Amino acid sequence: MRLAIAELVQSGDARVQRGQEPGEAEPLETHQRFRLVMDCEHFHEHRLRSGLGD
């Protein structure tokens, strides 16, 4: 799970927040709370393909 979160953050598809402050994906400890905030526009532009004319 940590690797998947790190990949989302590194690719710009998401960011990690700890409370109101930005956090980092890599040093998260086991049982440490955080919020994963997706950047849906970035995800859509870079990950989703319609298959029509691509």
Image (cartoon, helix red, strand yellow):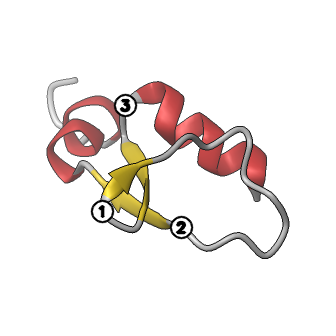
Quadrant housing the N terminus: bottom right
Q: Specify the quadrant of the image occupied by residue 17.
A: bottom left
- Circle 2 residue: 34
Q: How far apart in space, not on screen, are marks 2 and 1 (Cα)?
A: 10 Å
Q: Quadrant of residue 6?
A: top right
Q: CA distance from mark 1 to mark 3?
A: 19 Å
Residue 41, horizontal then vertical, whole percent: 14, 44
Task: Determine the secondary structure under disc 1.
Answer: loop
The residue under the point 85% across, 67% down is 30
Give the number of the mark in front: 1 or 3: 1
- Between 49 and 30, the residue placed more toward the observer is 30
Q: Residues within 10 Å of mark 1 (few under 14, many from 20)?
A: few
Q: Which residue is mark 3?
A: 12
Which disc number belongs to residue 11?
Answer: none
Secondary structure found at label 2: loop
Left or right position of 4 against 44: right
Q: Which one is in front in this view, the residue at disc 2 or the one at disc 1?
A: 1
Where residue 38 sits in the image (x, y, percent)? 32, 56
Q: Secondary structure at mark 3?
A: loop
Q: Nearer the viewer, residue 46 or 36?
A: 36
Which residue is painted at 61% across and 43% down in the image? 25
Q: Which residue is mark 1?
A: 20
